[in-house]
Image: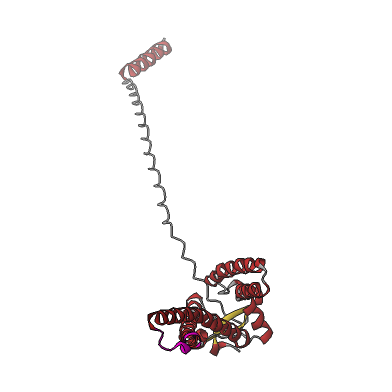
Amino acid sequence: MDDTNKESEEQENKDESQGNATPEPESTPKPESTPEPESTPEPEAAPEPAPAPEPVTAPAPEAAPAPATDSGGGERVGFGSRLGAYLLDAVVSGIGGAVIGMVAGGALVGLFFGSQGDGGAEAGALGALGAMLGGFIGTIAGMLLFYILILLMEAFTGQTPGKMLLKIKNANADGTAASTGTLVMRALLKYGSTVFTILAGVVGVAVLATVGQVWGLVIFIGCFFVLGAKRQAIHDLIAKTAVFKKSDIK
């Protein structure tokens, strides 16, 4: 019996201890984690500005061509000086022709009307007419004579009166002194129109005069070739010559 009572008491004590035990509080549920805010997308970078166009530089002007020179460095004479020499030659021919014309006019008057003595008004009129005619013919003849003299001077010396005054001279294209043969060939090319005209008058062949006119036109146009870089007229190109200052010719 005692054992039974003892077990009963132990059971009761056990139940009391269980009744007195404080129940553990329920664990507080953890709050749900706040969702992280979505990251704000970074703003797109502004497009890079287009590179400024490079300034267009104007092309440098081409350098003017160097003046034509010979192998020794002498500069060829240009159009201006050669035209000046031609005009001086024309003045010389005109003055020479006028002087010869006056002399020829006086000679014709004395030849045809000097023996008539005082013939009155009629004789005076004839004398005046003879003087005018003689002066005109003499002037033309004098100018032609001086023109031929200038032709011969240039053919054998390389200079005309005008070129002598301007101190320029014909020479080989390389600036060396030209031979007489070269100078004669150049002169015949340059004055070919005059040569053919004289031949036409001497032999009486009209076609030679026509050839002379065409030749003269070609030479006239060819003179403007001097404006080019080579500073040579067409007769210079054919004869392989040019005009230089006399002091530069080797």
Does the segment drawn in magenta span residue 118? yes
Q: Is residue 206 above or below residue 14?
A: below
Image position of 118 (left or right of 144): left
Residue 159 x, y percent position in the rendering: 56, 86
Q: Nearer the viewer, residue 111 or 201?
A: 111
Q: In this view, does 49 lie above or below 211?
A: above
Q: Quadrant of the N terminus?
A: top left
Q: At 66% across and 69% down in the image, what residue appears?
A: 208
Q: In which quarter of the image is the C terminus?
A: bottom right
Residues drawn in magenta: 111-119
According to the image, what is the colour scheme of the structure?
A: secondary structure
Q: Nearer the viewer, residue 45 or 242?
A: 242
Magenta stretch: helix, strand or loop mostly: helix
Q: At 59% across and 79% down in the image, what residue appears?
A: 242
Q: At 41% across and 14% down in the image, what residue appears?
A: 7
Please tell me in which quadrant of the rendered image residue 72 appears: bottom right
Please tell me in which quadrant of the rendered image residue 125 appears: bottom left
